[in-house]
Amino acid sequence: MAAYGSVWVTAFRGETLVRVDPDSGEVLGETAIGAGPEGVAAGFGSIWVVAQDAGPLVEVDPETVRVRDRVEIGVGARLVTVGRTAVYVSHFADDVVLRLDPRTREVTRSAKICDGPQGMQVVDDRLWVSCTYADQVLALDATTLEVETSVSGATSPDAMTSTPDGRLLVVAESGPTVVAIDPATGEVLSSTVLGAAAPLYDRANLGVAVSGGQVWISSFGEDLVRHVPLSTR
């Protein structure tokens, strides 16, 4: 993940967060996170990391690369994203999502929403969540965490991002496949199969980013990174 002038990488086996210079590739700093550092996101002046096997959501100072705070969220949480007013965590083991108020540190827990919530993306006042085991993509109210919309059409959906024109991109592990969704209507606009990889389920996550007019997708099972042009549909 790129933020605050650096690239941030979670070292799962090393149990650390690493800050990397985007031009030289030099390691600028690292800090101990705890067992199973997984999802990482930036917002509210901090870097946020989920320690999947240790239990906390860890807040890190992007300048000093030192831990500012640890908020207990329970073992088995997976990924994290940041919205306009809150930090969100997908709790894969408990089938819920969590909302952290960065000012008060209050954590709100949703009801069970689906089997295997993983990737998330905030668009307007909705939190979109991919449900890997349920083959669903859900839209939740970003404040109440109540489910508002359910979209099918992606097998083992995982990573998410949005495009400059506001579309939601979901990477399904099967293929992998890039699925474009209109977040206003929930309509599936396109589905582009990139390969023949089998779903990963709980073994690992895929990644997705939009840059330079391309969609970049990491494919764990194939040991490669794919990219396709960012279409208008």
Image (cartoon, rainbow, N blue to C red):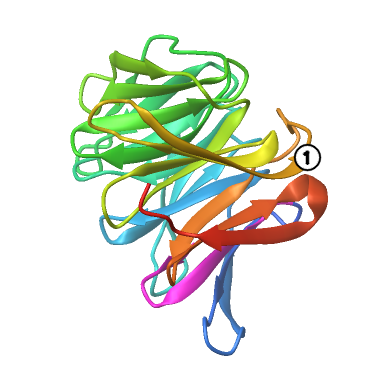
Q: What is the x, y in percent for residue 14?
A: 73, 58
Residue in view at x 61 percent, y 85 percent? 26
Q: Nearer the viewer, residue 185 or 33?
A: 185
Q: Nearer the viewer, residue 117 or 104?
A: 117
Q: What is the x, y in percent for residue 200?
A: 74, 33
Q: What is the x, y in percent for residue 196?
A: 78, 40
Instruction: Reply above or below: 50 against 118.
Output: below
Magenta residues, as a range? 1-12
Q: Which residue is mark 1?
A: 197
Instruction: Reply above or below: 229 against 7.
Output: above
Q: Quadrant of residue 17?
A: bottom right
Decide if residue 197 is on the left or right side of residue 123. Answer: right
Q: Quadrant of residue 212?
A: bottom left
Is 108 colored magenta in this rendering?
A: no
Residue in view at x 36 percent, y 31 percent? 128
Residue in view at x 61 percent, y 40 percent? 177
Decide if residue 214 is on the left or right side of residue 174. Answer: left
Q: Is residue 20 visible?
A: yes
| Amino acid type at mark 1 | Ala
Q: Residues within 10 Å of mark 1 (few under 14, many from 20)?
A: some
